Amino acid sequence: MTKSLKLDDQKERFIIDNWMHSKELEKDSFDIILGDLVLRLICFNKQEIFLKRIVNFLKPKGFFITRIHFINNFLQKITSKEIINLTLALLDSGKKNKGKYIRNLLFIRLLDKNFSSNQLEMRKQSQIDINDYIKNNPKISLNKKMILKDTSKRFIGEIGFPFLFSQKKEEIEGKIKKFFNIREKLITKDYDDSEYFPIYILTPKL
């Protein structure tokens, strides 16, 4: 994210702490706070508490710069099979040929497709979708099958990922606007779904 914003990450200070409950971080002590996709790691009922804490740590004219993911509504209008086909097609096109990239993209797209307030059910359904696809498409290449199997494990299994609390654009911006002014919103070009991962430049409401 620092590269997208052309920031000097040599001056960046990474602080390992519980930002929700820290007693070490001081009020009005930061000019800029960077948070890359942090809100989706925080459960819905604690996100506003987190945002209020960030306001508290920032200087009055400081900036909170954060990348946010909001749900791609289009994915909820098509089938899981279509989503998997669209994502795997990136391998065939040569546009993206790295398995890790495809796995991450498919992981997020299926979570958006199966979005629910019940995180466990959402992940179970996404895993079922992939396993059904593998079963019904026995002739797919070994490479694609391995990508699908690895992605399936990420939902529930050996390669566990933390719960991701994604929301619709209106919901997340509504929370942000309670505490911040949106100065600018940037869309990078380093990701196929970049428009659903915008970078917000925010200033505290005084």
Image: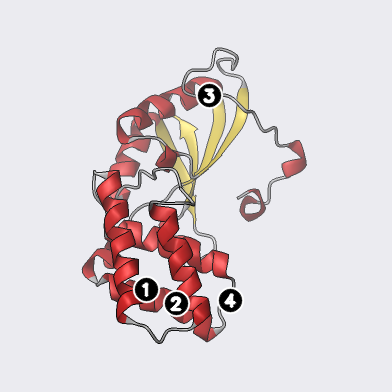
- Left or right: 58 with respect to 2? left
Mark 1 vs mark 4, CA separation in Å: 15 Å
Labels 1 and 2 touching (C-beta < 8 A) = yes
Q: Is mark 3 on a helix, strand or loop?
A: loop
Residue 190 seen in this snapshot? no
Residue 5, placed above or below residue 76: above
Mark 3 vs mark 4, CA separation in Å: 37 Å
In this view of the protein, which residue sits in the foreground, 49 or 157? Answer: 157
Q: Which amino acid does label 2 sit on?
A: Leu
- Left or right: 101 with respect to 120? right
Labels 3 and 4 touching (C-beta < 8 A) = no
Q: How crowded is mark 4: few (under 14 residues within 10 Å), some or many (20 or more)?
A: some
Indicate which disc residue 84 carries.
1
Which residue: 40% across, 61% down?
A: 152
Mark 2 vs mark 4, CA separation in Å: 10 Å
Q: Which of marks 2 and 3 is in front?
A: 2
Query: Looking at this rendering, what residue extends furthest in the top direction?
Result: 23
Q: In x, y percent, where is residue 132?
A: 29, 71
| Residue position for label 4 | 97
| Residue position for label 3 | 18
- Left or right: 156 with respect to 12? left
Q: In x, y percent, where is residue 89?
A: 45, 81
Mark 2 vs mark 3, CA separation in Å: 38 Å
Q: Quadrant of residue 172?
A: top left
